[in-house]
Image (cartoon, grey):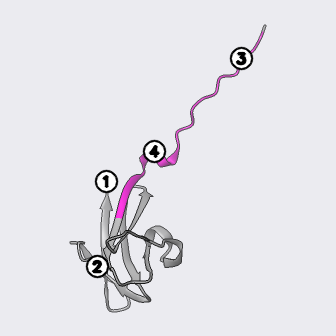
């Protein structure tokens, strides 16, 4: 009697991930980095890419949840001007908040 192995599809954790697009307009900037809960506040791990019109952009795949974040533009912290939700941080500034459902 032959035994047949059947591969089962293992559901990936990424199936529940949502696409989050982060944008920052800074035509004169040399670098724009993204830091937040999703990358342990390590801005170097998430550089944005500059488009021809000066818009910096990054697409991330994140699990549903609430995330705080900020942009680091040429070494200076900035909030997302399009973000409507903010929370205070321990440094006397505000962090932006995004919630993915």
Discs 2, 3 touching: Cβ within 8 Å: no
Name the outermost residue toward the top: 1
First-in-chain label (1 vs 3): 3
Distance, label 3 to label 4, CA atoms, is 28 Å
Q: Position of residue 27 (x, y in %)?
A: 33, 80
Q: Position of residue 36 (x, y in %)?
A: 42, 73
**Snapshot quadrant of residue 71:** bottom left
Residues shaded magenta: 2-21
Q: Which mark is residue 4?
A: 3
Tell me what residue is drawn at x 41 percent, y 82 percent: 72
| Residue linked to disc 4 | 15
First-in-chain label (4 vs 1): 4
Whether residue 13 appears in magenta in the rendering, the answer is yes
First-in-chain label (2 vs 1): 2
Q: Position of residue 86 (x, y in %)?
A: 26, 77
**The one of 46 and 8 positioned closer to us in this rendering:** 46
């Amino acid at each position: 009697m032959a035994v047949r192995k059947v591969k089962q599809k293992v559901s990936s954790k990424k199936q529940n991930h949502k696409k989050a697009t982060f944008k920052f307009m800074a035509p004169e900037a040399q670098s724009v980095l993204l830091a937040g809960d999703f990358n342990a506040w390590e801005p170097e791990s998430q550089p944005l890419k500059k488009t021809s019109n000066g818009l910096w952009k990054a697409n991330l795949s994140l699990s549903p949840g609430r995330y705080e974040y900020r942009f680091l533009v040429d070494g200076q912290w900035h909030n997302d001007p399009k973000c409507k939700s903010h929370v205070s941080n321990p440094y006397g500034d505000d962090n932006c908040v995004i919630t993915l459902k």
